[in-house]
Amino acid sequence: MNILFTGILWLLLYLAVVTLPLFLMLVPPVPTGRGFWLELSVAFGFVGLTQIVVQLILTSRFKSLSAPYGIDIILRFHRQIALVAIGFILIHPVLIIVDTPSRVKLLNPLGGTWASKTAWMSLFCLVGLAVTSLFRVRLGLSYERWRLFHLVLAGGAVIFALLHVVMAGLYTNALWKHGVWVLPGVGLILLVLYTRVIKPGFFPDSIWRVAEVRPERGNCVTLVLEADGHAGMKFEPGQFAWVTLGDRKFTMQENPFSIRSSAARPGRLEFGIKKMGDFTNNLPNVKPGTRAVLQGPHGAFSIDRYPAVGYVFIAGGIGVTPLMSFLHTMADRGDPRPVILVYADKTLEDMAFQEELAELEKALDLKVVYVPEKAGEDWQGETGLVTWDILERHVPRDLIHREFFLCGPAPMMASLQKALRAAGVQQDHIHLELFDLV
């Protein structure tokens, strides 16, 4: 099925699901003699709850769901729509008070009915989700601890919300209406446990072994994994996978890393990883033979999706990793198309994989332009930040016929995207790896 058509179909299905409660409210038996504001509050509450429940599907990493957009887009949408859903849910009690001011006593978390208490518990979980996600770094939460909080708080939010719906009895005054909410909710929670906990540790084709951990420039390492008793993982160059190391089947130490090796070699994967604290700092101590679990591949940032007469790759720091996968794959395929790689970092010493890039320049029609922010007096190349002036000196004028792939710090990509658009490059020829998954 065409990827564009599939993407539109998933979007229409999402809109149908989140608005379904509004139609179910009209199915008899329905309450009578209720004011406009109360009816509106119930509508906001149902739509907000449905959006929260659907988030469990969006974050379950189903390849068929994420393929048309890329999981980075799915997760950005998840973050944004979750805030919208929380807003809808906050409006729900406010409108109830507007309808009947005497219900203000329900705003007391320690008082009221069990229906209002479960609502407050769900709301506390949702607020906790938002705060720990938006301010994770400021709160000093490690990625692993944040994942644990996220899983527990999300489950609590959905469970308490479903209990509130059942206890409140608003538009659930029939057994089948209780089932409409409770059974799908429980099913989705079990689905998340299956996809995020059970499946990764027990399916044979997800098991790998560490073959090597190789130090690289720029405080980076290459993690090399080999398939353990299976053919490996078929992937598109530029995609990534979630990696878990160790023999424990249940762990929160699961991290997304870009594959930097060739897609033509699915049985041996290499990941370029920058040591940035927590899990990544311990990678040099990982021993060969250590068990690894992979979930993937994921991502839509790939040259295989955008054929062109030539490419321009722009990397900032460890953002060169998926671009290395592009180049290694092209070399293995004997791809003759011209490529320019503009590679920026703080210093030359920080730029990883320079020896490999030198070999790739011999195997491909490849030109590598290094742009250190600072360099010694003997450096004759470009310096500073990557700007249009630098690109213009190295990129051919046939811009409209090339595809641009950018991966690096968000400010760098935003600036270059604006510069490319100003130079006449069409938006659909500019591809960004927005690898902010938390």
Image: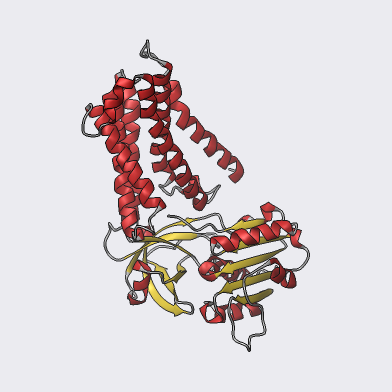
Q: Quadrant of the N terminus?
A: top right
- Left or right: 244 with respect to 163? right
- Residue 336 visible in the shown view: no
Q: Give the quarter of the image for residue 55.
A: top left
Task: Please say if 395 is above or below 33.
Answer: below
Instruction: Out of 327 and 144, give the one closest to the viewer.
Output: 144
Dividing the picture into quadrants, the one containing residue 175 is top left
Which residue is depicted at the point 59% across and 61% down?
413
Q: Is residue 353 visible?
A: yes
* Residue occupying the point 45% across, 71% down: 274
* Residue 228 position (above or below residue 352): above
Total numbered labels: 0
**Name of the residue lying farthest toward the right:** 397
- Left/right placement of residue 120 relative to residue 389 reads left
Q: Position of residue 347 (x, y in %)?
A: 55, 79
Q: Nearer the viewer, residue 54 or 39?
A: 39
Q: Is residue 96 above or below residue 391?
A: above
Q: Quadrant of residue 9?
A: top right
Tell me where residue 341 appears, x and y as whole percent: 64, 71
Report whether 36 appears left or right of 313: left
Residue at the (40%, 15%) spot, across then down: 35
From the top left corner, tell me how far across and down residue 372 is, in percent: 59, 77
Q: Quadrant of the C terminus?
A: bottom left
Q: Residue farthest to the top?
A: 33
* Residue 255 in the image, given as x and y percentages of width and height: 39, 61
Q: Tell which residue pokes out farthest to the bottom in this image.
A: 378
Q: Residue at x 67, y 74 (%)?
A: 366
Q: Residue 345 vs residue 61: left or right? A: right
